Image (cartoon, rainbow, N blue to C red):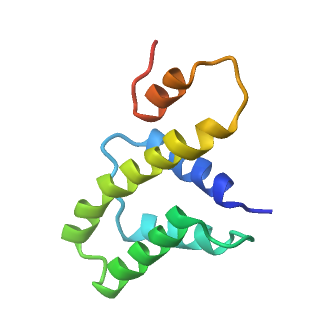
Amino acid sequence: MKTNQLFCYWLQGYFEIGINVTVQRDALLLIKNQLDLIEEPLGTFTSWLKDVCEYIRRADYSDTLCAHFSPIIELSLNSVFHHVIDNSYVTEIPREVLHRIHEGEHND
């Protein structure tokens, strides 16, 4: 079963693999396809992201819109981890450490 949370993990991996990721047409199509696989009602973030994908599609995947929305999508995803997903786990890792990880701050 594909859930909203599993989708968020998948999308986080997408952003972590790239550096200065700008979601373009192919990435948006992939994101939209993954959103369509969610087998539960969409959450606030996933519903918003589906609307963003549709908005950019209607604008023929404008480079300007893609560049504009890419950091917004990434920041919104980080917010989901910060406020929802990280807080849903019982762990000995301090929440601050989990939050820093999703904000791109790693302690190597």
Considering every residue shown, the one lying at the far top of the view is 108
The residue at the point 51 percent across, 49 percent down is: 80
Image quarter hosting the N terminus: bottom right
Q: Is residue 65 above or below residue 12?
A: below
Considering every residue shown, the one lying at the far right of the view is 1
Q: In the rendering, at what x and y percent does residue 83 appear?
A: 52, 43
Q: Is residue 69 left or right of residue 6?
A: left
The residue at the point 30 percent across, 52 percent down is: 71
Q: Is residue 99 left or right of residue 88?
A: left
Residue 56 falls in image quadrant: bottom left
The residue at the point 49 percent across, 23 percent down is: 96
Considering every residue shown, the one lying at the far left of the view is 64
The residue at the point 67 percent across, 53 percent down is: 6
Residue 71 or residue 19, whichever sits in front: 71
Q: Is residue 27 left or right of residue 90?
A: left
Q: Is residue 20 above or below residue 11?
A: above
Q: In the rendering, at what x and y percent does residue 86 appear?
A: 60, 36
Residue 13 falls in image quadrant: top right
Q: In the rendering, at what x and y percent does residue 61 appear?
A: 31, 77
Residue 67 falls in image quadrant: bottom left
Q: In the rendering, at what x and y percent does residue 85 appear?
A: 61, 43
| Number of numbered callouts drawn | 0
